[in-house]
Structure formats: structure tokens, C-alpha cells
Amino acid sequence: MTMQPDALSEKFRQWALLKQQNDATSKRMNHLRDEIMDVVVRDGDRDEKGNTVYSLPMPLEAAGKEWKGIKREARTSVVLNEERALEFAKRKGLDGVIEMVETIDLDALYVAHQQRQITEQELDGLFDTKTSYAFKPVSS
């Protein structure tokens, strides 16, 4: 089933208007969030986990829920510092924890082509072309 051009134009017009509203709403939400968080950080109570909680003077109802406060939640993750761990392993002689990963040196591959060790066709055969598509409205 094909759409009539005027029906598609109308759907696109609706999309463009909704996008504009969404962008404006997101901008306003982020601005409000930042202002609120400034108050939470300044006036809230910090707990042992690093969270900061600000209790509203009285609960309020909005969007079908009752809200009693705002929390600036601390989210902590533990991540290995690869550089520091590698230095440590070398210093301690822990060769078994160091993994060597084979990889292609792209610059050296191009040098090999320039030195005629591989042909243009062979070089081209090593690369894949991937195409992705994006929805991009065109304005005048």
C-alpha cells in the first residue's frame, strides 16, 4: 500500500512539530533539573553512601504520583586502571597476567602497499564497507 504524497507530508509536518516540542521540553527539563540539583547539593542531607537527599517541605502530587523529596544518587563503579595494573604486573614480574593481543598496524599495512609487497586489489580486499541509514529531514 502506498501513501499519497499529501498524507506523507502531513505526517512529516506532525513529526517536525512534535520534534520541536520535544526539543523545547527536553531543554526546559534539563534546566529545571540543574537548578533543582543545585539546591539538593547545597541544602540536602548526605548519607554514608554519598547520596544527597532533600525532603520537600510537604509532599506534592504531580503526574499521578505523590512526591516527598529529591535524591542525588551516587552511583559508584569499580574499574580496573589498565595502565596502573600493567605497570604493577611488570614491576612484580607477573608475566602470566599480561596478555598480548594481536592486531594489525594500519600504518604498516599501508607502508607494505607502498613498498609493493601487496597489491591495491589485495589491500582493498581487507576492508569491508558498511552502510547505515539515518533519518535526516531536509530543510531549506
Image: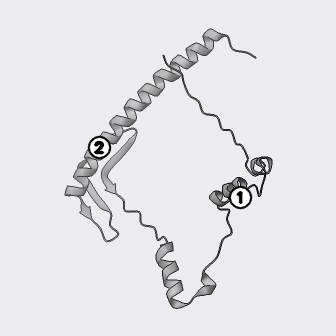
- Dots 2, 1 in contact, CB < 8 A: no
Percent x, y of residue 3: 69, 14
Q: How many marks?
A: 2
- Name the residue carrying label 2: 60
Above or below for 51 versus 5: below
- Closer to the camera, 39 or 115? 115
Which quadrant of the structure image shows residue 112? bottom right
- Closer to the camera, 10 or 66? 10
Assign the N terminus to one quadrant of the image.
Answer: top right
Task: Characterize the local packing of mark 1: few (<14), some (14-19) or many (20 or more) Cα atoms within 10 angstroms.
Answer: some
Residue appearing at x 67%, y 65% in the figure:
103
Above or below for 49 versus 112: below
Mark 2 or 1, which is nearer the eye? 1
Percent x, y of residue 120: 76, 47
Q: In terms of sequence position, does the residue under pointer 2 or pointer 1 come before the other?
A: 2
Residue appearing at x 29%, y 68% in the figure:
47
In the picture, the disc for residue 139 is: none
Looking at the rendered structure, the secondary structure element under dot 1 is helix
**Residue reaching furthest to the front:** 115
Percent x, y of residue 87: 49, 81
Looking at the rendered structure, the secondary structure element under dot 2 is strand
Residue appearing at x 42%, y 26% in the figure:
21
- Closer to the camera, 73 or 54? 73
Residue appearing at x 66%, y 60% in the figure:
108
- Name the residue carrying label 1: 112
What is the spatial separation of the Cα atoms under label 2 and label 1, in whole angstroms? Answer: 70 Å
- Closer to the camera, 124 or 42? 124
| Dot 1 amino acid type | Ala
| Dot 2 amino acid type | Leu
Q: Is residue 61 left or right of residue 119?
A: left
Q: Residue 63: in sight, yes or no?
A: yes
